[in-house]
Amino acid sequence: MSLRADQSQALVALAALGALLLSYPLLALFNRAGTVFGVPLLYAWLFGAWALLIVLLALATRPPPASADEPAPAPPVPR
């Protein structure tokens, strides 16, 4: 599967965002006593950042919508 140029740029940006979200300075901000729904704050941050990256990755790698100019793909031929 080849990536479009905008998808490649989005993936590079997501890698940089992931490195930023999981870097020590931000992790140190959330390494405090406290809980979110009974989960320690640091663990909640890690899970939330991880989940956000997965959602953004799924959105970035979606195929482009079919335009009205392109013909619809032919259905598969049964054998």
Image: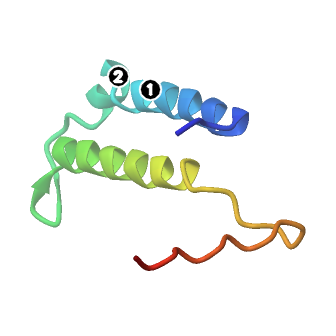
Q: CA distance from mark 1 to mark 2?
A: 5 Å
Between residue 19 and residue 45, name the one nearer to us.
19
Q: What is the three-letter code of the residue carrying label 1?
A: Leu
Query: Where does residue 20 sit, x and y in percent of width and height?
Result: 44, 26
Q: Residues within 10 Å of mark 1 (few under 14, many from 20)?
A: few
Instruction: Please give the residue where the numbered disc 2 appears in the rendered image.
Output: 23
| Residue at disc 2, secondary structure | loop
Q: In which quadrant of the rendered view does residue 62 lie?
A: bottom right
| Residue at disc 1, secondary structure | helix
Q: Are marks 1 and 2 in contact (CB under 8 Å)?
A: yes
Residue at coordinates 68% horizontally, 38% vertically from top-left? 4
Position of 50 with respect to 56 (left or right) is left
Position of 44 with respect to 75 (left or right) is left
Quadrant where the C terminus sits is: bottom left
Q: What is the three-letter code of the residue carrying label 2?
A: Ser
Position of 54 with respect to 65 (left or right) is left
Between residue 70 and residue 14, name the one nearer to us.
70
Between residue 8 and residue 30, name the one nearer to us.
8
Residue at coordinates 74% horizontally, 67% vertically from top-left? 66
* The label number, if any, that marks residue 6 in the structure image: none
Q: In which quadrant of the rendered view does residue 24 lie?
A: top left
Query: Where does residue 17 sit, x and y in percent of width and height?
Result: 49, 32
Q: Residues within 10 Å of mark 2 (few under 14, many from 20)?
A: few
* The label number, if any, that marks residue 20 in the structure image: 1
Residue at coordinates 51% horizontally, 76% vertically from top-left? 77
Query: Where does residue 68 sit, x and y in percent of width and height?
Result: 86, 73
Residue at coordinates 65% horizontally, 73% vertically from top-left? 74
Position of 34 with respect to 62 (left or right) is left
